[in-house]
Image: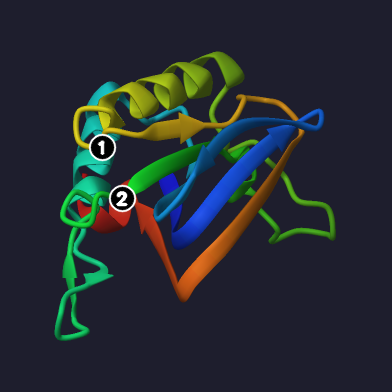
Amino acid sequence: MKVVLQRVTHAQVTVEEQVVGKIGHGFLLLLGVEDADTVETADRMVEKICKLRIFQDEQGKTNLSLADVGGELLVVSQFTLYADCRKGNRPSFVKAGKPEHANALYEHFVEESRKYVPKVEHGSFGADMQVELGNEGPFTLILTNEELGF
């Protein structure tokens, strides 16, 4: 599993000129799934993300979590995070999870996130989406289950 996390002032995802997900202050997550990922992987990633302390406290230190600041979450599926660009000029996406598996984990990830965050919005799996955001900081993290040890 790979996640690009962006701390945002606002974010929204649009499909066919219709806003399908919109948040204020919080995290925009671009989520990539591979076939080796499991429900347990998703659960641990959600918990890690929701407990990350990357919002500023009164002293300006990144010491507060999403819950501490009443933040919101927008989750967007992003199979292109598994692009392999080593050969040629056209990326290969063979490392991305098969659509049925990836969609099931994506939906599980969204539902699991609701245990930690009151407002969780999401994109449309497999759709052509337009994502808009105000990146706060900018503050962007890349998280993988391998790097996090699970």
Disc 1 designates what residue? Answer: 117
Name the secondary structure under disc 2: loop
Question: Callout 1: helix, strand or loop?
Answer: loop
Question: Compared to 34, does 145 lie above or below?
Answer: below
Tell me the residue at 64%/36% (across/down).
Answer: 94
- 86 left or right of 50? right
Image coords of residue 88 (percent x, y): 83, 59
- Bin the neighbour count of mark 1 within 10 Å (Cα to Cα): few under 14, some 14-19, many 20 and up: some
Tag count in the figure? 2
**Foreground pick, 17 / 101:** 17
Above or below 76: residue 109: above
Name which residue type carries label 1: Val
Residue highlighted by disc 2: 71
**Quadrant that contains the C terminus:** top left
**Dots 2 and 1: beta carbons under 8 Å?**
yes
> What x and y, as percent, mark residue 14?
70, 36
Q: Residue at x 36, y 45 (%)?
A: 72
